[in-house]
Amino acid sequence: MFTIYNGRTDLMEHVSYFNQIMVIHSKNETLMCKVFPSSLGLVVMRWFNGLEEGSIAFFKELTRAFDSRFVTCSRVPWNLNSLLSMTMQEGETLKTYSNRYWEMFNEIDGNFDDVAVRTFKVGLPAKHSLRKSLTGKPVKNVC
């Protein structure tokens, strides 16, 4: 089953998911182009149906046209500065802060484990027991 692209979610994730499902057929350009519309919702299907006949020869061209048309739906990954500025809010539970922090950490491109551990600790209130524990026993990695 394909996830149906509705024009509102990240298009590159959609194409990646489609490619993963179709991996055994990835060398068959014709099949890839013919099956791709099966993963499109109504709004996006109108765009697809409006493509000029013969304007797409390869699946890569189709995904490039798809990307150009729905570029505003691309997800922009968080940058490291977003993580560096995160702190535990007054009245926020450790669980809520931790969930928010690690969710953003997972959205950042790159390997910043060392920075993540330090900024997570610094984001905790100075008197928080977990911060004291992490300061007393320095953590070497995210795990």
Image: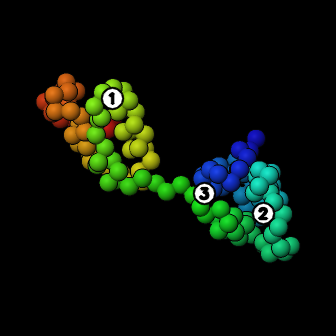
Quadrant of image for the C terminus: top left
User: What residue would you read off at disc 3?
Assistant: 73
- Picture quadrant where residue 25 is located: bottom right
Residue at 77%, 50% (x, y): give it: 41
Extreme-left residue of the structure:
136
What is the crowding at mark 3: few (fewer than 14 residues within 10 Å), some, or many (at least 20)? some
> Which amino acid does the dot numbered 1 rest on?
Glu
Q: Is label 1 in a helix, a strand or a loop?
A: loop
Q: Is residue 80 visible to the viewer in this orientation of the structure? A: yes
Residue 115 lies, in percent from the top left, at 26, 47
Q: Is residue 11 left or right of residue 129?
A: right
Q: Which mark is residue 47?
A: 2
Q: Residue at x 62, y 50 (%)?
A: 9
Callout 3 amino acid: Cys
Q: CA distance from mark 3 to mark 1?
A: 32 Å
Q: Earlier in the sequence, mark 3 or mark 1?
A: 3
Secondary structure of residue under mark 2: helix
What crowding class fits label 2: few (fewer than 14 Cα within 10 Å), some (14-19), or many (20 or more)? few
